Structures are given as C-alpha cells and as structure tokens.
Amino acid sequence: MTAKLVIALAQMTQSVGDLAANADAMLEWRARATGADLIVYPELQLIGYPPEDLVLKPALIERADHELDRLAQATADGGPAMLVGTVAAAQGVLFNVVALLENGAVTQIRQKRELPNYGTFDEKRLFAPGPLPAPIDFRGVKIGVPICEDIWFAFVTAHLKAQGADILISPNGSPYEVDKDERRLNGVAGTRVRETGLPLVYLNRVGGQDELVFDGASFVMNADLSIAAQMPDWEEALAITTWEKREGAWTCLPGDVHQLDERPADIYNAMVLGLRDYVNRNRFPGVVLGLSGGIDSALSAAVAVDALGPDRVWCVMMPSRFTSQDSLDDAIECARLLGVRYDNIPIEPAVGAFDAMLADVFSGRNRDLTEENIQSRIRGVTLMALSNKFGHMLLTTGNKSEMSVGYATIYGDMAGGYSVLKDAYKTTVFDLSRWRNANMPSLGVGFGPQGPVMPERVITKPPTAELRDNQKDEDSLPPYEVLDPILYGLVEEELSVAQLVARGFDQDIVARIERLLYIAEYKRRQSPPGVKIGSRNFGRDRRYPITNAFRSI
C-alpha cells in the first residue's frame, strides 16, 4: 500500500454546454500537473454548472459520454488519473456523478446523493439521488467523494468514514455569496472534519454563468483543522498537493495559502467576473450604458471598464431640460477618468415629439409620473438603438433598493441585457464606489485605471433621477440608511412588518415598503439578469407570485 500520494487540484472555469472545449481544457491542465498521481476537477466540469434543462437533452448526454471516453483514453499514457464531474444516465434517469479515469478507461463512478432544491438550485428537477456513496479505491487509498451538497449532511460523510475512507475530496459548484467563505470553511468543512477525523479537500470552480459567479477559494483542511492549502478566489489555479500517511492517517503537507478578499473587494470582483464572462461568452463586442452623472451609472461604468477595458465600454449622456450642470460635468469627468468613449445625445427633441403626439389624448390631464416615465423610456429606446446598430450589449444600472420598491421604469431604465448592480442595495453601491475610488480590484489589473473612477461629488450629492424639477430620491422613499435595512429584513430574512417594527422601524413606513415590494414583482419578472451577491437575489433565489394579496399587517 502506498504511503505517499500527489493530488493536483484544478480550480477551473467552465463553459456550459461546450463539452469539447471543457474536455480540451481539462487535458491541458492535466498536462501541467507534472508528477501528480491524480488530478481532480470541480463538479460537472465536463458539462458546466448549473446546466439547467440543457442537461435533459439526449444529444448532450451522448456527447458527454463521448467526451468522457476521450478523456479516459488519454489516461493510457501513464500520466495522472482523472476524477471528472459529469452526468450519467441509467434506467431512464440522470445522475450527477464523478468518474475515475485511469489506465485508459472509466474504472469507477460515484453518484451525488443530496440534491439541492432551494435558492439558486433545482437539481431535483434534473437528477435522481444516488445511494450513499462508497469510497473510491485508488492505489490502495480509500477516497470518499461527497459531491458538493453531500458535505452539508453529516450522515453522508459519516457513512464514508464507516466505509473506511482515508481522505474526503469534495468537488463543488458553489456560487459566491457575501460571507460564504466563513460558512464553507468553519461552518461546513470544519464541522465535517471534526466529526469524521478525516482531512478534506474542497475544490470549487471559478467564473461567471448568467447570474451566478463562482469564486473558487478552494482549500485543503487537515484532520487537525489546519489549512494545508488555500487557493485564490476569482482566478483559475492549479495546486499540487502532497499527501503522506503517518501513524496510520493521511496528512496533506503544507502548501501555498492565499489571502482571500474581504468585503467589499469580494463583491466588486464578483461583479467584474460576472460581467466579463457574460459579455465574452455571449460574444458581445462590448457594452453601452447611460451615464447620468449619478452614482449607479458611474459604478456600473467602472465595473465594466475593469471587466472589459475602456475600449469596449461606451457611455452615453442623454440630458433633458431637468438635467443639472453638475450631472453633465460629473458624467464627463467619469468618462475621462475611465478613458471610455462618451457621447451626448439630448432627448428633448423626442420629449417634444411625444408631448405633441399625446397632446389630444392627454388633454385636461395634469403632468405626472407618466411624463417622467416617457423620458426614461426615450432613453431606453435610444440606448437600445445604439445596441442594435453597433452590437454592444446594453448594461442597465439600477440597484436592488430601486428594484425592490419599483423605483424604476419598465421598458425604460430597466431595459437592457445585464445588470451588475441588480443584487446590490444602494448603501452597498456607496460602499463599493468609495472602495473603488481608493483601491484597484485584482481582476481589474490591466483594464481599469489605478486611481479614482468617479468624482467625489458623485458619491456625496443626494441621489436623484432628474425627471422633474428639484427631484430627489428621498422625495418618494425613506433615506437609504432606513430603507435598505427594512428591505433586507423583508427580502433576505422574510420578516413581517411586526418583526421589523420590533427592531425600531416605523410601522407605517414598513407597511408601505412591504406593499411596494409586492406590487413591483411584475417589473422584476421583466428585468435583465444580474450578478448575484447576496442570499436572496431577485430571480433564481426569490420566486414570488406576481398576483399576490398577502400582506403581513
């Protein structure tokens, strides 16, 4: 029986549905794992995660089998064996599996037992649960392979321990959320290691996939809870780990330990990576966005430049008669600091045309929110025209506070293809803007500027939509320092009005915000996708009925 094992950990990105490219990339990483006995890949690395209903196509399953055979044949060269995440069909159902490839063949397969069916996950729709897994016997070492969700359940790892597992290796497809590093490391991994007395490898993927961003941050925890290896967040990486059997137990020798991002750097990098992969994988030449002189559009533009570079970001100011000189000046300065193309397209000719067109039918009615929304929709049409003509994806700039209470215009400022601020409350937008003006994100190196990305006045001036004279956001909404904690309680924590009143908030304000939250559901259903950063994003996490008569008071 061997007393030493070298295991390579491939923290990789994936391209959902591009199985040949995923397989090619796995072979390239295998070639780099010089001296390894085994190379391990993240969950569903061959398919891409999450595959959603794409995995129900028989043609995809056939291709997965073909590519898995191709990978298996490559191991006939005597190099590292491969532990590959893929799908397998048996008796008319699908399983989420890992396959051991060695000596030119698929030698062992283990199925995922626990299928997450909450939040962003809907695996019970796609897969059947496997039996409690037995360890994989690899060169005399029994390796337990709890796949992702499996390590959240003590009985799965306890079963592997009882079956003689020496090491636990958990391939993951775990999306980023704020504060998730702590929950993974000390909450889940640490608990499983303490319970079983076994070392654990946590291997996660990296990259953006629609609204989800995978942050990597893979690690190895020894049985004494020490961290033998900590891989970086946000970046692909290969770790070569050396394992030795000492006094009957396996231990990973100390390796590189990378420092992970803290808040708000982690949020900002999630936005950068999510946008970069969305734009590049959908083959857009770049993005176009409205630059208003306000903080939301300024931050969105900064994220876009850090993600794509200034030559792929096009900012457009669309002033009306309500646009202040400060806004005009601030937009120009934002564009200068970021080094992007900037155009000024006044909307007054279109506003006048709509006023004339609707004059007869609006006769006898006072000007109201309708005319404000027309301005926003004119801007949306203008930006979509540029997107159609030149191919750039329209980047929307609304934040979660606005989307929560419906303070956004459907078919206006909500129009577009993607939103990096969709899951960021307004107070988070302020935090991110201050941070970015003083820091350079790790993923933005070589793309965005080293210094400030917006004038300080953009951060300090009162937020306004500038759709009427002297308009301020706080004319219609409570101050964001009050609004955002209420929304967090209603959305992330699912609290009632009474529970929030018990925290010290005014009952009438909370009841009004709850009502606005519910009646804006139809708008959010028609909003573009955006980067998920919290535990309850609008879309995959929080799925409320549009027609909803419930109120908690």
Image (cartoon, rainbow, N blue to C red):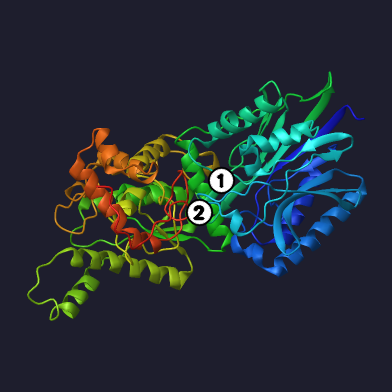
Image side of residue 493 versus residue 178, left or right: left
Residue 211 is marked as 2
Residue at x-position 67% and y-position 51%? 129
Place of residue 437 in the rendered image (x, y in percent of width and height, measured from the top left) = 39, 38
Q: Quadrant of residue 4?
A: top right
Which residue bears the numbered disc 1? 175
Q: Position of residue 523 (x, y in %)?
A: 34, 62
Q: Foreground: 462 or 3?
A: 3
- Residue at image position (75%, 43%) is 133
Label 2 neighbourhood size at 10 Å, few (<14), some (14-19), many (20+)? many
- Disc 2 and disc 1 in contact, CB within 8 angstroms: no
**Secondary structure of the residue carrying numbered label 1:** loop
Query: Does the image show residue 238?
Result: no
**Residue drawn 17% across the image and 52% down it:** 471
- Does residue 461 appear in this view? yes
Please tell me which residue lies in front, 229 or 201. Answer: 201
> Secondary structure beneath disc 2?
loop
